[in-house]
Image (tube, coloured by chain):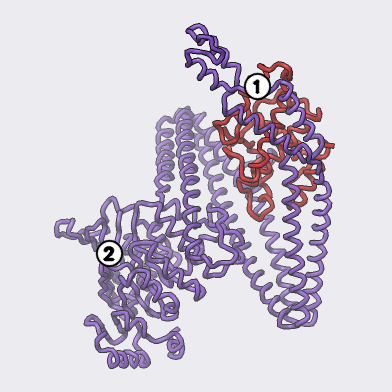
Chain colours: A purple, B red
Amino acid sequence: MNIRILGWRSKGMKCPDIDLKFDPKDMVDFIQMKNGTGKTTTLTLIKIALTGNQDLSLLQSTRAIKNNNKKALIELLNKNNDIGYFSLDCSINAKLYTFEFVIDKDDKEVIKFSTQSPEYGGKGRSDYDPPEDAAPFLTPQFVELFVFDGEKAGTIFDSVGDKAETTINTLCQFNILDESIEYAENFLKEKAQKIGKGDKGKLTGYNNEIKIYTKKLEKAKEELDQHRRNIKKYSGEKVEKENRLDKLRITGSLDFKKEKAKLNEQISTNKSNMEKKRGEIVKCILNPTILSSFTSKALLSLNGSLETLKLPDKVARAFFDELSNNDECICGTKIGKKEKEHILLNKENYLDDDLTGLLNSIKTSVSEERDIKDFNIKEHLDSLADLVVFASTLEVKLVRLNKNADKNIDEAIELNTRIEVLTNMITDEEKFIKLYTDKPERKDYNVDVNDDIYNIKVLQDNIEKITNKYHEYNKSITLKNSFDTFQKIIRKTKEESSKIILSGMKSKVQEKIDIVLSDARPPIKIDHIGRYVKLDGQEGLSEGQRLSTAYCFMAAAFSYSDVTVPFIVDSPTGKIDDDIRENVGKMLPLVTDQFITFITPVERAFFYSHIRTACNKKCSHVTIYNRVKKIDDWYENFKTKYPEYIDKRNTINDKYGIIYGHKAMSTYTTAQEAQEIGED
Amino acid sequence: MNFKISKAADEWFGGKGAFEDKGLTNARLMDFYYFSALVGLLSFLKGSNKEFKNIEKIPDTREFMDEWTLDYKDNRYSIIGLLIETEIQRIIIDREDKNSVKEFFKSMLSTDSGIHLTTKGADRLSSYSYMGYLIISDEMKKMPETYETFLAKYYKILSKFIS
């Protein structure tokens, strides 16, 4: 499946009226717009057109308004217009489709979709109607994967969320498996009702109980998420306050700075000594020969037995096979049928070559270590204990040093108080989370449906238990058992497939990281990919490194699906460091065949030229701006200075300027000027 | 042929996030599996666990590794040796009967498997690991929060069987 955006037209919306066309040969399409020019609106309009979905919350649009989608849609219109129009030209497997919609604030339905395509024989369709095989890739969830805000790409590292898992599920279409379970469950309910062998009142009782538990389960899950979000919020604030405190201390006293650096160095050395010592202890445990005289003796006893029995034999089984094929024995005796049979029978008493080798390896490993009498694990453990004590001493010293430094600074006192409060709040939240997630004990199941139950496992088990009771009473338990088996198979399929995909994806992402972030020290390594992407030493990463890693993840994820889609990204580099922008610029054209990006003038630096080089300058450029005197002056100068670069498509209307070409894009007014004129 | 870990041991060792720094990776799970196996083997050899005589199967397991991880490459043969010696004592093989000993080796060792053990051999080692886990979890009560504390407590248990 190949989806490509060929352009779009917009009229009367809260973004410039525009008719954009992209050349299918281009790999990157740049749209330069400052903040406040209608970037977010344009992204939302693209999402609506691609998905045929008008629910802005579902489309994760920042333009969504809670419980009032109608208002949110109307707010996409330019304030002077009652009607707006947007149409998006796409190539889907090389066939042209145009998805259109009109927003009319006086119309009861507010929004009306239509689809045009030569495939429909010249007649348009009066609703959103993508080709059937493309529909799974044009759902809000799927579109969210390739139309996004660059700065939010880092959410795949968010341990509270499940962005990485959702991405993989969506890309690999695992939702079809989930839907099949849902379908089977509905089928079961329907059939069970038809069977209906039990007393209606009792069955309704069971159903009500299931409903109550299900409601409680949903509530518990929501609350658990909320507690996790709280921890994230408090932890974020805590880190921020700690950093501020650190800054205060450092600027406060030079002596403190020196003392703290010294202490930190000691802590780090001690930590590495502890790791070394730990390694030595594990090394002793791992080798039974040097662990203790007792283990050594046990192994020597095995060796003794082998030696007494002269095992392994000097001759292996293969020798007899070979001998039996000869006409004559090495001693000169003729080998006939009878002798051959006898030799082959005898060979069963011998071990084969491989087993002989293995036995020899076991023997050698023991005898090689025979003279080692270094049973010093105890000494290593004593040293480790000393290092642990020393680590605590250093921590106490650090706390004291910090406290002394804070004594005379009011802000530091305030910060310390807040940090303490936040620490307690985090601990409380962790306690709450345990209520929901701890492994339940038998006593936790002694509950009534009306009790306050928080534990998710208890709730799930109770739902399962009562559902089974219902089906047993209803005589539909055979059907329920079939459903359970089906569900188990589907879940196992999903689990096993995920395992394979995740392991493959981990190496693919790592390969890309090694190229894009080759200069990172220490090197960035993925620990695992699950609900979210966990990196080794994640806390130490800069914003830029996190974002670059997120792009690597997306690139690897898309390489696992059979679909090629355009990446439409707002602010692709966000807060990325200048030196990393260069590498990201080089990598982005490799992510997909078409990269449509909304950039601000600030983002051009260290990025724009590299991405252009990486795609062999196969790119289009359009700069869109709100008209103000300073920028009008810039364009007038541009026209005088570079008359040969004036594009026929350039449009200047009352409100906007739309200027095409690389030269205009690269010389366009800087962010600083933008601030002076109060745009950003 | 795979190493198997019981669900209970998996949860117990992973319960504290296996010391938080890296989570319960397969390599770390392999360590816990081996640490437990060593306690299981030694407690039998020391004669403190005669219940092992009947242990054949462990409850609710999952296969988690089909080869010795890098840290074990140098020591895998002596670990297998210790298993063999323990099993010779457990099932009372006549050490002087060459054929019985050979048959026993054939039933336990295999070069077709990444762990050099037959299914039976791997299951025996996993059984010792499970018994070791029962001893460790009983003595430690709860999984320590740091690797250092774990090692110290582990050695305390181990030293009962090696001293």
Image quadrant of residue A88?
A: bottom left
Measured from the top left, where is residue A220 in percent x and y?
58, 51
Measured from the top left, where is residue A22 in percent x and y?
27, 70
Viewer-proximal residue, A677 or A641?
Answer: A641
**Residue A402 sits above or below residue A344 on the image:** below
Return the mark for residue B104.
Answer: 1
Viewer-proximal residue, A202 or A405?
Answer: A405
Give me the chain letter of mark 2: A
Q: Secondary structure at mark 2?
A: strand
Q: Are marks 1 and 2 on the same chain?
A: no
Q: Secondary structure at mark 1?
A: helix
Give me the chain letter of mark 1: B
View extreme (left): residue = A122
Q: Which residue is mark 2?
A: A112
Name the residue rendered at 67%, 23% in the picture: A311
Measured from the top left, where is residue A27 in percent x and y?
32, 67
Kindly identify the amino acid type of the residue bearing the numbered disc 1: Phe
Within 10 Å of disc 1 (Cα), the crowding (few <14, some 14-19, many 20+) is some
Measured from the top left, where is residue A434 in percent x and y?
66, 51
Q: Is residue A519 left or right of residue A238?
A: left
Quick check: can you spot residue A676? yes
**How many callouts does the rendering have?**
2
- Camera-nearest label, 1 or 2: 1
